[in-house]
Image (spheres, rainbow, N blue to C red):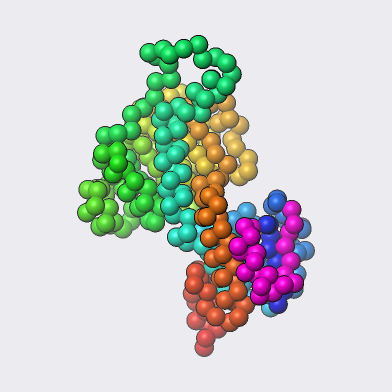
Amino acid sequence: MKIFVTRPIPQAGLDLLRNAYPEFKMNPEDRVLERHELLAAVKGLDGLLALLTDLIDGELLDAAGPQLKIVANHAVGFDNVDLKAATARGVLITNTPGVLTDATADHAWALLFAVARRIPESEQFLRAGKFQGWGPLMFLGGDVTGRTLGVVGAGRIGHHMALRSRGFNMRVLYADELVNAVLEKEIGARKVSFDELLRESDFVSLHVPLLPSTRHLINAASLRQMKPSAYLINTSRGPVVDEAALAEALRERVIAGAALDVFENEPAVHPGLLDLQNLVLTPHTASATIATRSNMATMAAKNLLAGLRGKRPQNLVNEEVWGKQRR
């Protein structure tokens, strides 16, 4: 079997692959391959372990050839994959759900506190030697305890992010197509419309997949629906937020602040965001704990090996391909 891994992943996943197929190939450099490099690397493959930064479309699948059995995505989201093209070619697509839920929910809270309490801004102030002693007006931020948390998307990560609010006695609102009975029972969360959530929340935390309906869900109009004292947190997908509109809203103090872990055109960040003090930025590291990334690598490798061995991968995204293969 010919296998290729597009970028180094944690050792636990590589060990699984090496034990099964010692001759597998991997991009040895810790960087995203250029498009022409990736197209060359996939030729003749039976299995591909890809990352969210790799575009898996019809062109790539055709470059690999009709023998390609599976693409294991080292991510929960799979908006980098043309699912229709893969399904039409009979290629199994998998992802790594669940494994990064806690780490991402934790990171959303870290961002929330960092922006509300102005942690990066005050640390830079201190490190620059500007701290001359305590002052009653120094770095005043927003309160968290007792405030209203609005969770947009109450799936796995949004659910766990909301549950963590219990320690802060927060009122929780959520906007989702489905009712989350557990949140309503355990923390008294209330399902509301997206517009009501924006109007009522002190913190708006985004946990939606990237779909045509969620692209630029946060835009100039929705930002103006938020409280001037509110904060926006995004650990979902970058294009959910219109970065140009956000930059303007932060400059004009339409909202108090924002914290982003993902960006509209990664790795690029809208230049209007970079010099804003009421904005916290992290480089897509919400799942970046040793245990979480190791578990992601292991799950992706297991999915890949199952597909290559003719078994149904545990985290299969396009079930219809498996159904056709079983007929």
Q: Identify which residue is drawn at 59% across, 35% down.
A: 270
* Residue 298 seen in this snapshot: yes
Q: Quadrant of residue 98?
A: bottom left
Q: Is residue 133 above or below residue 115?
A: above
Q: Which residues are magenta?
A: 9-29
Q: At which x and y percent is residue 194?
A: 33, 45
* Residue 110 located left or right of residue 12: left
Number of callouts in the render? Answer: 0
Q: Identify which residue is drawn at 52% across, 42% down.
A: 261
Q: Nearer the viewer, residue 194 or 161?
A: 161
Q: At which x and y percent is residue 61?
A: 67, 68
* Residue 34 seen in this snapshot: no
Q: Identify which residue is drawn at 46% across, 44% down.
A: 107
Q: Identify which residue is drawn at 41% across, 34% down.
A: 113
Q: Quadrant of residue 148?
A: top left
Q: Nearer the viewer, residue 121 or 320?
A: 121
Q: At which x and y percent is residue 231?
A: 40, 33
Q: Nearer the viewer, residue 110 or 45?
A: 110
Q: At which x and y percent is residue 6?
A: 69, 60
Q: Is residue 23 above or below residue 183?
A: below
Q: Is residue 31 above or below residue 81?
A: above
- Looking at the rendered image, the quarter that the N terminus falls into is bottom right
Residue 19 in magenta stretch: yes
Residue 189 in magenta stretch: no
Q: Is residue 52 above or below residue 165?
A: below
* Residue 283 located left or right of residue 138: right
Q: Quadrant of residue 94?
A: bottom right
